[in-house]
Every structure is written in structure tokens, then in C-alpha cells.
Amino acid sequence: MKVEKLTKLTETNEQALMAIWLAGNLDSHPFIAAKYWQDRVSAVSKQLAKATIYVVLQDDQIIGFAGMMTNYLAGLFVKPGFRDEGIGSLLLFALKSDYKQIRLSVYEKNSKAVRFYERQDFDKIDRSLNPETNEVELKMKWKE
């Protein structure tokens, strides 16, 4: 397994990233209607082109990715079947090498992700209600 920055977002890469993104959101957020995520596929797909994308490859297949917008971690996702194998930690190690500070938002009810980020030395800095989902989001921050 290796982490690399995507230098070119091909249609094949975009499809792989979006499949991982959708599966990850559906699996991690059972408290939010599936339609919410499905309705955002097109918008998120467009955002990928604006983000700095880090991918984890195994046998030339993308099995995980993180999208950065400046120092904001817009998302970190691992393909089903590859979770809990250190891929998220591998991605964050690469991000921490390239950024002095990382901010993110995570749903409070996504307790597995909250614990993951806490283990990665992220601190909770704010808590607010997301008006679109009516769910509580935590703002977290890591600083070198």
C-alpha cells in the first residue's frame, strides 16, 4: 500500500472516489437519510476537482482517499472491505507531513470517526447543529 497525491483526476479515478465516498457516508451516517448523500453526489464530484486528493493504492486500485481544501480536511474515506486496516492513519500521516494544521467537521453521532480523530491528536474546538441534516457536528483541529 502506498499514499500518493493525485496529480490528475481522471474519469475512472473520479468514479472510484465517488463510489468510496457514497459507501462511506451511507455506512457511517445511518442517522441521516440515504437520499441526503445521494442528492449530493453531483456537487461533491465537482468539488473533487478543486481539492488536493491523497489516495491509498493497492494493486493500482484506490482503496482510500482524503480530500483537502487548503487546511480543511473535507473528507477521509476508506473502501468497504479495507476499513480498520490502518488506511485512515496512513492518509493522516501523509497529510500531517504536508500541513502544519488540519481542521475538519465530523458528526457527533459518528462516534467511531470521532474516536479515530481523537487518537490522531485532533482536539474538539466547537460543536454546532448542521441546519441541512439537523445533526450535531463537531469541529476538530490538529496542529503541528
Image: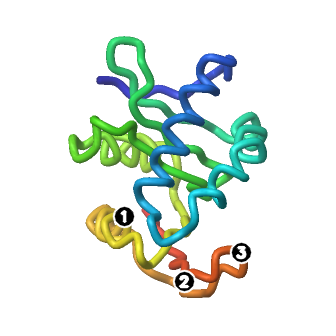
Q: Quadrant of residue 130?
A: bottom right
Residue that appears at 35% across and 39% down:
80
How many circles with numbers are drawn on the protein?
Answer: 3
Residue that appears at 39% across and 30% down:
63
Q: Reading the chain from its start, which is encountered first: label 1 or label 3?
A: 1
Q: Is 90 or 97 nearer to us in this picture?
A: 90
Amino acid residing under circle 3: Glu
Secondary structure under the numbered disc 1 in the rendered image: helix
Above/below status of 123 relative to 35: below
Q: Residues within 10 Å of mark 2 (few under 14, many from 20)?
A: some
Alpha carbon of mark 1 to alpha carbon of mark 3: how far? 20 Å
Q: Quadrant of residue 144?
A: bottom left
Above/below status of 1 relative to 103: above
Which mark is on residue 113? 1
Residue 16 placement (x, y as % from top left): 54, 26
Going by the image, does 142 lie left or right of 112?
Answer: right
Residue that appears at 54% across and 83% down:
136
Amino acid residing under circle 1: Ala
Please name the colour scheme applied to the rendered image: rainbow
Residue that appears at 59% across and 22% down:
13
Q: Which residue is mark 3?
A: 132
Alpha carbon of mark 1 to alpha carbon of mark 2: how far? 14 Å
Going by the image, does 97 lie left or right of 130?
Answer: left
Above/below status of 5 relative to 8: below
Nearer to us of marks 1 and 3 is 3
Q: Is 127 or 26 nearer to us in this picture?
A: 26
Amino acid residing under circle 2: Val
